[in-house]
Image (tube, rainbow, N blue to C red):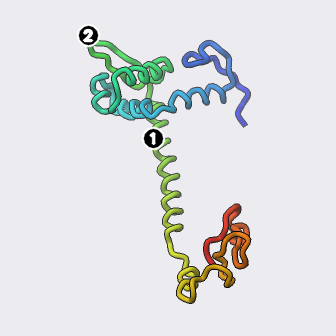
Amino acid sequence: MEPKARVRVTAGAFVGMQVPLYQAKAEFFRMLGHPVRIRVLELLQDGPMPVRDLLAEIDIEPSNLSQQLAVLRRSGIVVSTRDGATVTYALAGGDVAELLRAARRILTELLAGQSELLAELRQVDPRRQAGAAVGGGEGLGGGGGGAPGEPGARTGHEAGIPGRRAVGG
């Protein structure tokens, strides 16, 4: 359970307020919740970049990039420096890069699990193949492929899958 700690927020929507830690974390993740902001942070992992280079890498209007950079700057997650007409952005600290690496690891694990499930779903059910060769394997004959409520149809619960109707014999 999250401790009942309260934090004073110095950036974002709750500036100066004492909010529960879980609320401050939620606001932080909401701030990260835009694809352009994530892409900017990914690009800045390699080091500071001028706005013109960010624009070349991200296919958006300059005004939209400016808006997203302002959100990141106000939150304190990036810093900017100006040298003449060139504005350069950099990550405010290494923890952001570590968070992005952690997100990549988590997504890799999630997607690997999904691809395993997809491969499993794509495998042909040997019972369906055998039933099809004998006479269709579906319908009223008891194979289990009929519509819900028809003889031979099994619910997902009966097939061991909660909330789903079995597709095979």
Which residue position holds label 2?
84
**Which amino acid type corresponds to the residue marked 1 in the rendered image?**
Arg
Q: Quadrant of the N terminus?
A: top right
Q: Position of residue 75 (x, y in %)?
A: 50, 20
Residue at 57% across, 87% down: 135
Residue at 68% across, 17% down: 18
- Of tags 1 and 2, the one toward the viewer is 2
Q: Position of residue 24 (x, y in %)?
A: 62, 25
Q: Rounded to the nearest whole Å, what is the CA distance between mark 1 and mark 2?
A: 33 Å
The residue lying toward the viewer, choosing from 21 and 55, is 55
Q: Position of residue 54 (x, y in %)?
A: 32, 28
Q: Quadrant of the C terminus?
A: bottom right
Is residue 1 left or right of 114 when viewed as pictured? right
Is residue 117 left or right of 48 when viewed as pictured? right
**Which amino acid type corresponds to the residue marked 2 in the rendered image?**
Gly
Identify whether 37 is placed above or below 149. Answer: above
Q: Residues within 10 Å of mark 2 (few under 14, many from 20)?
A: few
Identify whether 62 is placed above or below 131. Answer: above
Identify whether 121 is placed above or below 24. Answer: below
Is residue 113 left or right of 60 when viewed as pictured? right
Please tell me the numbered disc located at residue 164: none
Q: Earlier in the sequence, mark 1 or mark 2?
A: 2
Residue at 37% across, 17% down: 80
State the image quarter where residue 30 is shown. top right
Please tell me the numbered disc located at residue 101: 1
Is residue 33 left or right of 145 when viewed as pictured? left
Q: Position of residue 86 (x, y in %)?
A: 27, 16
Identify whether 157 is placed above or below 52. Answer: below
Q: Secondary structure at mark 1?
A: helix
State the image quarter where residue 21 is shown. top right
